[in-house]
Image (cartoon, helix red, strand yellow):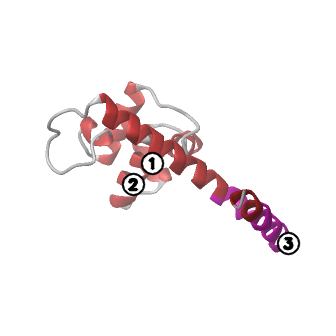
Amino acid sequence: MLIGKRLRDLREQASLSQGDIERRTGLLRCYISRVENGHTVPSLETLERMAAALEVPLYELFYEGDGAPGSRPNAKELAKEAEAEGEARFLEKVKRLTERIDEKDHQLLLYVAQKLASR
């Protein structure tokens, strides 16, 4: 689980802006943005402040299921989840970068990717 993505999801579910979280926590909006985008790992104290601002218990920042958390996942499940998140993070970066390039460069990139995939 990426904690930044989870924080953003909870903030958006609560219909709050980063500015709202800034006012409720005293943290700078640019710091909140860095956390949500995975550029900074917050301390436990910061996570407690964010949970309070979102009006959720601290465990909800780490738990996506319904109700209170149950049993812990085993090591294999955690490894599989981490691998999937790594791939998702990479694809998200590629998406953000390709949105910035012009159409000609985009076509060239697709052509190179097709050639590499056909090998």
Residue displayed at 39% across by 39% down: 80
Looking at the picture, how far across and down is residue 50, in whole percent?
Answer: 38, 39
- Specify the farthest residue to the right: 104
Q: Is residue 99 magenta?
A: yes
Quick check: 47 above or below 96? above
Residue displayed at 78% across by 63% down: 109
Apparent side of residue 104 relative to residue 53 in the rendered image (left or right): right
Mark 2 is on which residue type? Answer: Asp
Q: Which residue is mark 2?
A: 9
Start-end of magenta stretch: 95-112
Decide whether the magenta segment is chiefly helix, strand or loop. helix
Choose between 20 and 66: the one closer to the eye: 66
Q: Which residue is mark 1?
A: 5
The mark lying in front, picked from 3 and 1, is 3
Q: Quick one: quadrant of the C terminus?
A: bottom right
Residue displayed at 47% across by 45% down: 85
Looking at the picture, how far across and down is residue 49, in whole percent?
Answer: 36, 34
Q: Earlier in the sequence, mark 3 or mark 2?
A: 2
Q: Which residue is mark 3?
A: 104
Looking at the picture, how far across and down is residue 95, in whole percent?
Answer: 64, 59
State yes or no: discs 1 and 2 in contact (Cβ < 8 Å): yes
Mark 2 surroundings: few (<14), some (14-19) or many (≥20) residues within 10 A: some
